């Protein structure tokens, strides 16, 4: 299947890059608008996030970014808004006396049939200092 640039891995990578830059300045994770992330519009996927509009968080946030396919794609059935197929958890580290701690990402593909569509999605995991 070829969706061009319309695929969760590419959209998530953009989100992480913008979140990294925001964290470097504010020591917090921000909602989509604050970090400059435009919520993608797509015929194939729905995208969303769990950080409240206009807000920042300094603690772990499940589903800070998430995506769902709108229709069945091979063995990947559509998820729901409360149980999306692709998620990213963010954990902003607390500032220390010397410098700020990093922000950690945990990418997850919840439906087994969706992993084959995005084999590199979980490589988004990591900590940025």
Image (cartoon, grey):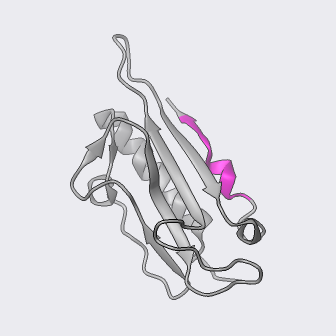
- The region drawn magenta spans 120-127
Quarter of the image for the N terminus: give it. Answer: bottom right
Residue 13 in the image: state x and y as whole percent: 55, 57
Residue at 60 percent across and 79 percent down: it is 78
Q: Residue furthest left?
A: 54
Residue 3 in the image: state x and y as whole percent: 64, 82
State the residue in front, 122 or 35: 122
State the residue in front, 3 or 67: 67
Q: Relative to 63, is 67 above or below?
A: below
Residue at 75 percent across and 62 percent down: it is 119
Is residue 106 inside the magenta stretch? no
Residue at 35 percent across and 22 percent down: it is 95
Quadrant for residue 113, please give it. bottom right
Is residue 122 inside the magenta stretch? yes
Q: Is residue 93 left or right of residue 106?
A: left
Residue at 29 percent across and 36 percent down: it is 26
Residue 61 in the image: state x and y as whole percent: 42, 46
């Amino acid at each position: 299947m070829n969706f061009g640039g319309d695929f969760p891995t590419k959209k998530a990578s953009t989100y992480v890059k913008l979140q990294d830059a925001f964290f470097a300045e504010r020591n917090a994770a921000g909602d989509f608008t604050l970090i400059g992330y435009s919520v993608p519009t797509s015929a194939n996927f729905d995208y969303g996030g769990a950080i409240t509009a206009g807000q920042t968080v300094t603690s772990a946030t499940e589903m800070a970014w998430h995506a769902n396919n709108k229709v069945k794609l091979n063995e990947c059935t559509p998820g729901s808004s409360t149980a999306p197929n692709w998620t990213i958890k963010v954990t902003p580290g607390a500032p220390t006396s010397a410098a700020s701690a990093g922000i950690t990402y945990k990418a997850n593909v919840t439906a087994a049939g969706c992993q084959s569509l995005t084999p590199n999605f979980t490589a988004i995991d990591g900590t940025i200092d």
